[in-house]
Every structure is written in structure tokens, then in C-alpha cells.
Amino acid sequence: MTADSPFSGPSEKHARAIGLVSETMGELVEFWGFKASMGRIWACLYLSSQPLTATQLADLTGLSAGAISMGMHELAQWGLIRRVPVPGERKRYYTAYTDVWEVVRRIVRERELRLIGRAVERFEEALALLKAEAAENPEDPDLPRVISRLQGLLTLARTGYGLVERFSEVGDFSLTPIRGTLSRFLGGTSAGDA
């Protein structure tokens, strides 16, 4: 570790604890589809009582300068870290946004909402195609069942979109609006239909 690292003092336990949190956050964000390095960098910035430089972050995480640079760029694009001025310093210092719920809401709004919205659009497109096919071939016995199941998926996706949208706006999440939809959707399936 460098001399300017805030964790390079006498406490090895402090540095080890930061390392454990950093590694764990890396694993968690990797599971969510992000790069592990992003989680490691954010965790170090989040836990730091003062802004850190890229060099300090490399020392703390063991990541290469390139991985730090790319990770910080992506974190800044997501609005999860920001550059802060440090009087008398020419180096660039960074800090993490510390409102964890706001961070989660921002990610949900930018990523999950877009994904669910795309699913709704594609389900609607598929439903229109199937309805057109049913109009052209009313004797096809399979189409009504497929259309019905697709309508269930579309209803579920629309409800999910509303829930995610509400969470991303106000941070409130309740499964109450989806319970009826899930009951109808799951209740209409039997082992023979699977």
C-alpha cells in the first residue's frame, strides 16, 4: 500500500475488513450482471471516510490501473461515484454516493425497467402476430391456448413494470398488486400443461 492510502496505517484488521467487504460486493454485483471490479471499487469508496485516488483504490483492491480506470468510468456513468475537489491536490479524488437505496433505485430505473419494458413490447408484438394468425386460421385449435398464455405473460410483465417503476420512483415495493395476477397465471397451469 502507498503512504497516502487511508488504510495503510497500523491497523491490519481495518485493511482486511475493507478487503472482505470489497470482495463480497464484487461478488454480489457480478451476480447482478456488473463487473466485479465495479463492486470492489464502489465498496472501498463507500467505506472510506475521505475521497480516494485511483492509486489508492488500486492499492486497496489489488486491481490493475486499467481495471480501476474502466471501473471508475462505468461507476461514474451509472451515477454511483463522483469526482471531488481536494484543496491543494492535483490528483483526482473520488467518493461514492452513500444513499444505498438511491443507488439501488437508480440501477433499477436504468436497467431493470428498460429490460421489462422491452419484454412488454415484444410480448405485445407476439400477441398481435398470434391474433392475426388466429383470424386467418380460426380452425387452429392450439392458437387460443397459446394466446391465452401469452396474455397472462403480458399481464404479468405489465404488472411487474408498474411495480419496478413505483420502486424506482419512491423506493416502495409491495407485491399486493401482483398477487392476483400471479394466482391466475400460476393457478392456470397444471402438470399436464407444462
Image (cartoon, rainbow, N blue to C red):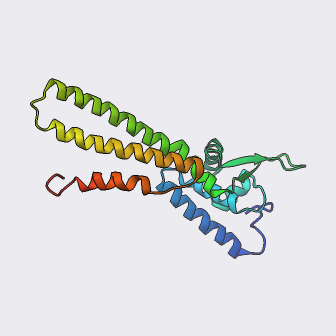
Picture quadrant of residue 175? bottom left
Residue 22, compared with residue 155, is above or below; it is: below
Q: In this view, does 107 lie to the left or right of 182?
A: right
Number of marks = 0
- Rendered residue at 77%/64% (across/down): 6
Q: Is residue 185 left or right of residue 178?
A: left
Q: Nearer the viewer, residue 181 or 4?
A: 181
Quadrant placement of the N terminus: bottom right
Locate residue 36, reporting x and y percent.
54, 55
Locate residue 91, reporting x and y percent.
81, 47
- Rendered residue at 26%/28% (across/down): 129
Residue 178, compared with residue 128, is above or below; it is: below
Q: In this view, does 141 lie to the left or right of 120?
A: left
Q: Is residue 38 visible?
A: no
- Rendered residue at 43%/42% (across/down): 116
The single residue placed furthest to the right in the displayed view is 88
Q: Can residue 132 be seen in this view?
A: yes
Q: Is residue 76 left or right of residue 111?
A: right
Locate residue 93, reporting x and y percent.
77, 50
The single residue placed furthest to the top in the displayed view is 136
Locate residue 142, reporting x and y percent.
13, 38
Q: Nearer the viewer, residue 118 or 148?
A: 148
Picture quadrant of residue 109? top right
